[in-house]
Amino acid sequence: MSLEKIRETVIEKAQKEKEEIIARAKEGCEQKVRAAREAIIEGIERRLRGIEAEFREEIKRQIASLNLEHRLRLLEMKNRIIDNIFIRAVDKVINLPDDKYLAMMERRLLKVDSNLPGKLFVNARDIKRIDLLFMDRINSRRQGGSRIDLNQDPIDIKGGFVFRTNKFEIDQTLDTIMVDLERELAPMIAKEL
């Protein structure tokens, strides 16, 4: 083999080796690029899943907040309706004809212990409604013989009465009666609304 042939063979082998090295390097680079691309895509997809999960949680929070706000508004509306019902009820009782209003007062007064003497306190309008005959009728039906006297100084109430003894008082004002009724009936009324 001549030197020229050897040289050509060496160059040829070197060229093939160079091409193989370049091909392997190219393949290695392409694999690295693919791996980097896949890692980047996986990272982006993972971030997107995280953002999507956060977004879903935020939507759930906002929906829950809106539902709560809606329920609170409904409750406020129901409470206003209930309050209005009881305000109208007080107005109706106050504006009853005298005979019906006094019959209601009599029923409540007769529930007071008949052994307790005391004073009856009412508003200015009721002082005019209640006459001596009414008081005599109440006192005659009390079995213990103790009297109830009508105090002539009006108190600031819408209607009903306050019965005072030396030791305590019994509040039968319309406001107190309605508060008790509202506490008792409001849940049932709210259910109906």
Image (cartoon, helix red, strand yellow):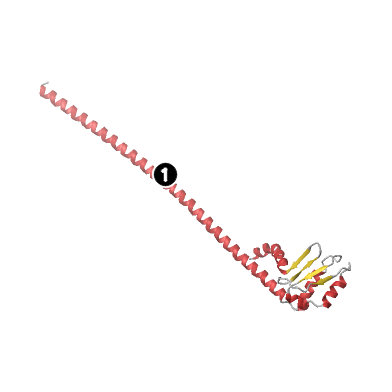
Asked whether, in this view, residue 133 is left or right of residue 46, the answer is: right
- Residue 41 at x, y percent in the picture: 37, 43
Q: Please name the residue that numbered disc 1 is placed on.
A: 46
Pinpoint residue 94: horizontal percent, then vertical percent: 72, 74
Of 2 and 148, which appears nearest the observer?
148
What residue do we see at 65% from left, 67% from top? 83
**Vertical arrangement, residue 11 with respect to residue 88, above or below:** above
User: Percent position (x, y) of residue 96?
Assistant: 73, 77
Residue 120 left/right relative to 65: right
The mark tally for this picture is 1
Looking at the image, residue 26 lies above or below residue 134? above
Counting other residues with Cα less than 10 Å from the Cα at mark 1, is it few (<14), some (14-19), or many (20 or more)?
few
Q: Identify the secondary structure beneath mark 1.
A: helix
- Quarter of the image that includes the N terminus: top left
- Residue 79: quarter of image: bottom right
Query: The C terminus lies in which quarter of the figure?
Result: bottom right
| Farthest residue, direction top | 1
Name the side, left or right, on which 134 lies relative to 70. right
> Of the residues shown, which amino acid type is indicated by label 1?
Arg
Q: Position of residue 36 (x, y in %)?
A: 34, 39
- Residue displayed at 34% across by 41% down: 37
